[in-house]
Image (cartoon, rainbow, N blue to C red):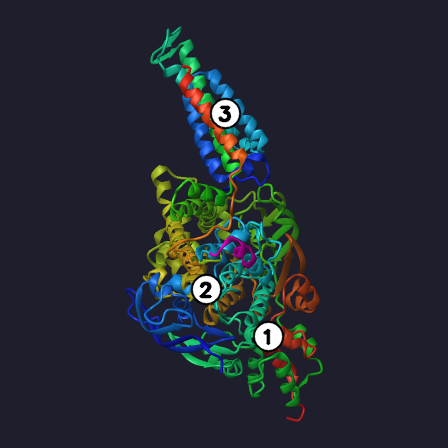
Amino acid sequence: MVLYIPSDTLLHRLHPSTKIVGLALLLILTVAFQSPWYQLAILSGVLFLAWASGAFRNLRRILPLMITVLVFSVVSWSLFRRVGEPFWAFGPFTLSVESIRFGFAMGLRLEAMLVSGMIFVSCTKVEEFAYGLRSIGLPFAVSFALSLAFRLVPLFFTRIGTVVQAQQARGLDLKSGNVLQRARKYVPLLVPIFVYAIRDTDLLSMALESRGFGMRGKRTEFLSFPFLWRDYAILGTLLILNLAGWLIQVP
Amino acid sequence: MNQPILSLSDLAFTYRGASKPALDQISYVHRRGEFSVIVGETGAGKSTLCRCLNGLIPSFIKGRLDGSLQVAGGPESGHPQVYELARIVGLVFQDFEAQLFSTNVELETAFVLENFAVNRDRMRTRVEQALRRVGLAGFEQRDPSSLSGGEKQRLAIASVLAGSPALVVMDEPTTDLDPVGKRDIFRLAQVLRNEIEGIILVEHETEHVLSADRILLMHEGRVVLEGPPGEILADPRRVERHGVRPLQTTVLLSMLGLETDALTIPDAVSRINTAGWRVKDDAQESLNRARQRVTGEPVVQIENLVFKYGESPPAVDGVSLEIRAGEFVALVGQNGCGKTTLAKHLNGLHGPTAGEVVVLGKSTTDWTLPELGRRVGYVFQNPDHQIFANTVRDEVAFGARNYGFSEETVRVKVDTALAETGLSGRDLEDPFNLTRGERQQLAVASVLVTDPEILVLDEPTTGLDYHGQDAILNLIRRLNESGRTVVIITHSMWVVAEYADRCVIMSGGRVVQDGDVRSCFRNPELLESLYLEAPEAVRLGYEFGLVARSAREIADCLERPDG
């Protein structure tokens, strides 16, 4: 994927389906708790994994987003959620110890989810992702289409960049005018972009067909990933954590 | 006689909704071990034919297909499906960007084998073998997007070869490549002809395919001529009439009134010498005097320009360059050497990371993008990146309207631009119904409408047949002669030789050679070291001890003392 960081850490070496199922289990685990302390523990855990897998480089790229998410959820949940005894009130806003606790729990939960997702994209190649999806039972065509989408997004953005530049070179000024005027200025961009998207897709489908895509019957895989003890260990640990978490369910 | 591996009889195809057939009465037999080349103008049906050969027509592209297509080892009757033919006929497309989709070279090559359900061990061997054949061994783990243009196209070829097709069909594989990338593909085709059972190549540059067994000349959906290169290419006028640039050897021979069937440079030279032609005494001096243009004040001054995309190494790395009013400059160099990045500084699409670019007396950082765009017209490589309007007139008017001229002024400006580009009277046509060559002219018209002093054109001839190239080049020359400064980016060295006055060669983000065009061609070894190659006419001149820019110039330097 675009944010993939080539490396050879334990997380990189995991079986693709372990990565996918593991991510799902992590996300479910964060939903189990509503206590900020447990969320903090989970967040520390995934931050450790991020460090161990070298995904910190990508976290730095989304740092502004992470801070915004944290601040926004702490502030808004604390002010709007009505639980416990409010010690402060102003119009629709109230503050209580419970609502602040809840705000922190929500904020930290979203952070843990973001970090987990980031670890996943940092150590999973598009092909591994597709392979993983197939090995947990998705049909080839679906997994291929998904992985292709990941692949084509950056290409599509390059095309858009070229079209924008080509029209700017003819004096198109996207910055001035009111909302309606500006909306109309996108017409000269949309037509060439669509023409391109259609042409590219058409060419790619022909290239795929010409290389035997769409043949009936079995196909084989070039890549192969052994499912090892570490995969069992990681999935097992996550399962136990989830079981324990959902049994305790500390409010 | 070798066995036929492909036979077509009376093949005809009409696209759904079209009134005229795209292919008509095509009969052709390809035998084991043969190398055939298809040439012809835009719209002659070359790509349509290629797409019939591997079954994309009619199973993917719909329409009416008549006649028969038999492939050795393929189904006995009916029109076979793509997946039935893909094992036997491999098709490589022109656009290498659009046909690659994997994250590394090895997986790209393996895709076809996965589809054919080859087992994993055999798959490894065949991937290795295919990559070795195209010279990409050691590139297995590279991301295809990090490869050069030539490498990408060779990867596209490997990804087809891995499937072990009997016949490989390549549809203009070299169009978007720099001279060395092109040469590598032709060399590869030479190697492959001995290793696989058959090759069919669609190609414009006939000079590189003289060793083919056969040339098919197509026109309006038919194969009008078929035979060995010596027969088909020996008549420069006929070749040119069909939208193919003739061999310059045959052009020179015909100018001298000699028989034109000596195609290679050594053969042509010996024929000319035998006929008694000699180089005139002061030939080179008079060539050097010719075409020296008077230029004006500097309009572009670039000082130590550095430009980086994000954190990557500089795309332009310390360029200083001055361009004067009225110059015709060609910017050349291999794919990815920084030509386009440099050119985009001239109209402010890029701003310098370090250094300064002064255009028309003012630093580009002091110009607003729209104002600079009005004075520096930039024509992008592909006209389809900008065409959006319903009529030719609206398309051209777009630029003028952006600057808030009155409708009356816009009308006058559009009329002038259409007249200058030869599109007068086509005002109300739909731009998408024009030919690719006409769309390129339309793109030029749509920047001319603001009457810019400087024109920058990125690869103006790519994807056009010879008629289209000729039309656009003559248009650019007229615009230059009417006083505009012209900068073109190009891979076509013959365009540089025949049209430009000054040649700036870039390599690795730097300018490595800058001078008048003739001086650039004085040093063939230097060109070679920069992955460029002197064009055919120039190399023909070398044989007479001349540095000439065209066949015409050589002819002017020769005389026959005895009459």
Q: Overall secondary structure of the magenta stretch? A: helix
Q: Are marks 2 and 3 in contact (CB under 8 Å)?
A: no
Q: Nearer the viewer, mark 1 or mark 3?
A: 3
Residue occupied by mark 1: B550
Q: Nearer the viewer, residue B3 or B369?
A: B3
Q: Which of marks 1 and 2 is in front?
A: 2
The amino acid at mark 2 is Leu
Q: On the same chain: label 2 and label 3?
A: no
User: Residue B367 appears at what percent x and percent y?
Assistant: 53, 45
The amino acid at mark 1 is Ser
Range of magenta residues = B118-126
At label 3, counting other C-alpha atoms closer than 10 Å, the crowd grade (few under 14, some 14-19, many 20 or more) is few
Q: Nearer the viewer, mark 2 or mark 3?
A: 2
Q: On the same chain: label 1 and label 3?
A: no
Count of number-bearing discs:
3
Callout 3: chain? A
Quarter in which the C terminus of chain B is drawn: bottom right
Please tell me which residue is depicted at 47% across the width and 20% down the height of the picture. A39
Residue occupied by mark 3: A67
Task: State whether residue B360 appears in this view.
Answer: no
Callout 2: chain? B
Q: Do the residues labelled 1 and 3 touch (CB within 8 Å)?
A: no
Q: What element carries label 1?
A: loop
Q: Nearer the viewer, residue B272 or B117?
A: B117
* Among numbered discs 1 and 2, the one appearing first in the sequence: 2
Please tell me which residue is depicted at 50% across the width and 58% down the height of the picture. B96
User: Residue B290 appears at what percent x and percent y?
Assistant: 63, 73
At label 2, counting other C-alpha atoms closer than 10 Å, the crowd grade (few under 14, some 14-19, many 20 or more) is many
Identity of the residue furthest to the front in this view: A229
Residue occupied by mark 2: B91
User: Residue B320 appears at what percent x and percent y?
Assistant: 66, 52
